[in-house]
Amino acid sequence: MIDIHCHILPGIDDGAKHMADSISMAQSAVAQGINTIIATPHHMNGAYNNYKTDIIAGVQQLNDTLQAENIPLTILPGQETRIYGDMVTDLENGDLLPLNETSGYLFVELPSGQVPRYTEQLLFDLQMKDIKPIIVHPERNRELIENPNILYDLVSNGTLTQVTAASVNGNFGKKIKKFSLQLIEANLTHFIASDAHNITSRGFVMQEAYSVIKHKYGASAVYWFMENAQYMMDGDLVIGEPPERIRTKKKFGIF
Ligand code: FE
């Protein structure tokens, strides 16, 4: 199993604090059946900046350690970049790191409360540079929960999304679980990933999420998500089913 979103690099964000944490996380991932992780440290989120070259060096160091410890897990470089206006310029400057470095897919994190007005234009501009943007955990964004049509428009225009395993399991509450399932049903998401930060409060729980998905939508849905992670990692095309609009409940008396 591939996990495309994880804070396993030591000491650089709010994930693993030190190498011992990274090793425990690696062991926990292997126990879940994960053999490949894309390490995606926070970048430009107001608290943490992690530039491309530093991440690549950190991944190398962690892989060396895992090999020395005989842990059968491969770490690939990636980055979770909070959306900002100069992303295209900084991508060209070499500050930003697409997933697995050369896949052409780039994580974009929205602020949790809203969707900035320039989002649509920026996601378009990235695609004009042959970058395929993936919005991380849209199910946890307040504005998208209230107005899922915003996400429908973005996905219709070629943006992909990643739902977090813990959201599917209900660990972030009923509302976020419900919205996660609606996103799956409406073809508004393409990847499931752990976004693991530790082995306690923010663990991997990928097995659990895939079993919820299998139970509700069948094994083919699970394979579809798993294959998408592989295609993405290899830089191949990920094509979703045509997105649908999520029906929001009509308020009584308003037509
Ligand atoms: Fe994350």
Image: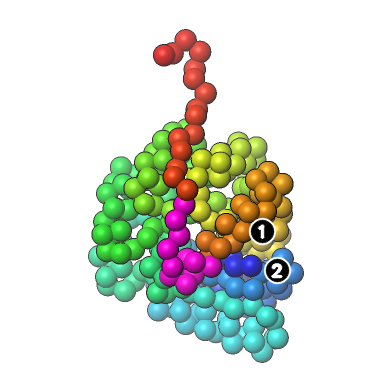
Residue 45 in view of the camera: no
The residue shown at (53%, 68%) is 230
Determine which residue is flagged by label 2: 33
Question: What is the x, y in percent for residue 122?
Answer: 29, 53
Residue 65 lies in the magenta stretch: no
The numbered mark at residue 206 is 1
First reached walking from the N terminus: tag 1 or tag 2: 2
Question: What is the x, y in percent for residue 86?
Answer: 27, 59
Magenta stretch, residue numbers: 230-240
The residue shown at (52%, 79%) is 59
Question: What is the x, y in percent for residue 218?
Answer: 67, 49
The residue shown at (64%, 78%) is 73
- Kind of residue at disc 1: Met
Residue 231 lies in the magenta stretch: yes
- Kind of residue at disc 2: Gly
Q: Residue furthest top?
A: 253
Q: Rate crowding at label 1 as few (under 14), some (14 to 19) or many (20 or more) other CA atoms within 10 Å.
A: many
Question: What is the x, y in percent for residue 219?
Answer: 67, 53
Q: Nearer the viewer, residue 169 or 235?
A: 235
Image position of 127 with respect to 95: above or below: above
Image position of 182 with respect to 8: above or below: above
Q: Secondary structure at mark 2?
A: loop
**Which SS type dominates the magenta stretch?**
loop
Disc 1 to disc 2, C-alpha distance: 9 Å
Instruction: Tell whether 167 sits left or right of 115.
Output: right
